[in-house]
Amino acid sequence: MKIFVSSDDSFKSNFDELLQRGNMDIEGVTSIVSGLLSEIKSGGDDALISQIAKFDRWTPSNSSELLVSTDDMAKAYESIDSDLRDALHLAYDRIESYHQKLMPKSWIDFEKNGSMLGQKVTPVDIAGLYIPGGKAAYPSSLLMNAIPAIVAGVEEIVVCTPTPDDEINELLLAACHLCKVTKVYKVGGASAIGAMAYGTQTVPKVDVITGPGNIFVATAKKLVYGEVNIDMIAGPSEIGILADSSAREDYLAMDLLSQAEHDEMASSILITTDMELANKVSDKVEEFLSTLSREEIARKSIDERGAIIVTESMDEAIELMNMIAPEHLEVMTSNPMELLPAIKHAGAIFLGENTPEPIGDYIAGPNHTLPTGGTAKFYSPLSVDNYLKKSSIISMSRGGIDELGEACALIAATEGLTAHEASVRMRMAKQ
């Protein structure tokens, strides 16, 4: 694994390259995705079926075949191993409990003059969830996207998932049953995003689309933003680790690999103040690579996008990590809480040696749908907020319009908006 020393002359150029880790060639696929979306918008189900035949290697005989039956979801739930079913329930309960604590409240405040100001929090009507599928199993993604919507009070949840060769993962269906999702459609990629954004004869138009996906999914979400809301434009998974000499090299190495095995484009970056530890971790990474079921993927990720950085101080290490703004940040130091106030940018922060990143992927409770590629500087994790909207409440009393009206009318007049001014002054003149 590459080791960079922050005091070396070549460090800046190497670090700048690391900061570009999340770049996706969205421009390169925009014309393709735009064409697919246009077909869905104008052609509805017919275009959807045509695109499924082209990309997923099966052709629905009619649009009714796109919808997975609730009976199939119930059977999948009943057929899974009882220990796994219990694990899914435990994850559900913890995710639900965490997101319940995030729920904002409606409120009203009365001023002395009798006026009333407030905020009304309301869920969207329909949420669309994109869940990667096919032969891969991502029940955790379903839980992480559906449960916040359920907690927010969304009435209708629509799920789209790709089914290459018309194969759908039973574990995903089991998770859908657990979440009481009744509308699951066998369509993926940009086609799914278009169907949920514009609506077809079969797939309903939604208000917000959330969930991870490849570059075509990310590009489609970017293009339909405004037609619907979206959670974020997410790229390949990543992990950053801050470590001092107290950290265990085997823990660090395996945690770096836990992201590298996701995707060749994933990035794993360790920043430490200890050169000896850096060398040991590099050796351990090489040792562990051969034990992984996805060795080829992980090795390419580590070789092309992995790095260990050695700094002169922990303050410098934190400064560099804030510039990286990683999706996942592990703090493996003797006193991780001590560093927490200085950490400004990270999707999720994992404190202490007993808190590996995968615990957050599945069971801890906070959401695992997180900002990537440095966007943690301005994006937050997926939460109930993504499925809510807030309306301001304003009610002026007679005393309130008398007290505030003159200032309001003056500002309106200054902006040249005479109807605005008159609207206020009419209330002030009323006896």
Image (tube, grey):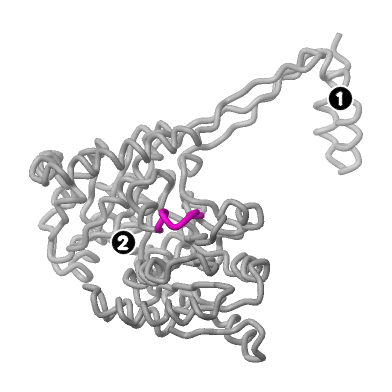
**Relative to 32, 318 lies left or right:** right
Q: Quadrant of residue 280?
A: bottom left
Question: Would you name the residue on which mark 2 appears?
Answer: 191
Residue 329 visible to an observer of this rendering = no
| For residue 76, above or below residue 272 | above
Please name whichever residue, 315 or 61, is drawn nearer the observer in this view of the structure. Answer: 315
Question: Would you name the residue on which mark 1 appears?
Answer: 405
Q: Secondary structure at mark 1?
A: helix
Quadrant of the drawing holding the N terminus = bottom left
- At which x and y percent is residue 375? 56, 62
| For residue 186, above or below residue 28 | above
Task: Mark 1 or mark 2: name the one nearer the start of the chain.
Answer: 2
- Look at 54% across and 52% down and name the residue there: 380
Quadrant of the drawing holding the C terminus = top right
Please name whichever residue, 301 or 213, is drawn nearer the observer in this view of the structure. Answer: 301
Mark 1 and mark 2: Cα distance apart in space: 52 Å
Q: Secondary structure at mark 2?
A: helix
The magenta region covers 349-356
